[in-house]
Amino acid sequence: FCTPCLQECLKPKKPVCGVCRSTLSPGSRALDLEKQIETTETTCNGCNKKMFLSKMRSHAASCSKYQNYIMEGVKAVTKEPLHSTRSFPNRFTFPCPYCSERNFDQEGLVEHCKALHSMDAKQVVCPICASMPWGDPNYRSANFMEHLQRRHRFSYDTFVVGDYDADEDDMMAQVLMRSLRDK
């Protein structure tokens, strides 16, 4: 993970793993993963030099052939922006679908609804889902509180890089570029 992505996983009151969503224990190290990184050999895609994964980041920062390799990949997937910024829905704050109080982040909306509307049986549209490209702004959840707790335990922004409509390969290339820039 790059630092900003890892920080997003650690933001909630109960931090979770960015891959499997299990609860993280602060201060515990993934020793098996560290060992695997120290002992797994790889080849630089630029200069074809063999090294352990643990050395790849520092090598990539100084290998001009690897940097050229990455830039060729970036050029291959770079596209003109599909939409202006104004055409994207707000995915940072949401109104309460029960009382219309505004400007909740996702976690705040969940906490607000648990505290004030846990017994409200009215069928409502989930404002978080409605803001997503795949969301139906007319779908009313039969049990909104259960939906919130099951579907919105984490923020989609933690896992989506920028454009929700972007191609998955394009997003992966962007993530790789960002991880190489963050030392």
Image (cartoon, rainbow, N blue to C red):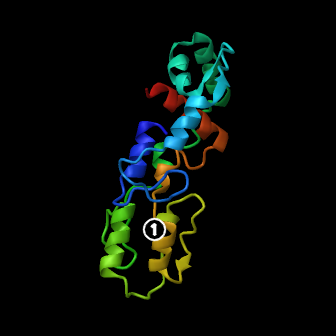
47 w.r.t. 125: above or below: above
Q: Residue at x 41, y 40 (%)?
A: 4
Observer-nearest of 146 and 49:
49
Q: Residue at x 55, y 43 (%)?
A: 83
In the picture provided, is 171 more to the left or to the right than 113?
right
Observer-nearest of 120 and 15:
15
Number of other residues with Cα within 10 Å of mark 1, as a class: few under 14, some 14 to 19, many 20 or more:
some
Residue 42 position within the rendered picture, expressed as x and y whole percent measured from the top left:
66, 25
Residue 90 position within the rendered picture, expressed as x and y whole percent measured from the top left:
43, 55
Secondary structure found at label 1? helix
Q: Which residue is mark 1?
A: 127
Q: Residue at x 54, y 43 (%)?
A: 32
77 w.r.t. 154: above or below: above
Residue 96 position within the rendered picture, expressed as x and y whole percent measured from the top left:
36, 72
The image quadrant of residue 105 is bottom left
In the picture provided, is 98 more to the left or to the right than 22?
left
In the picture provided, is 104 more to the left or to the right than 69?
left
Q: Residue at x 63, y 30 (%)?
A: 40
Give amino acid for label 1: Pro
Residue 131 position within the rendered picture, expressed as x and y whole percent measured from the top left:
49, 61
114 w.r.t. 7: above or below: below
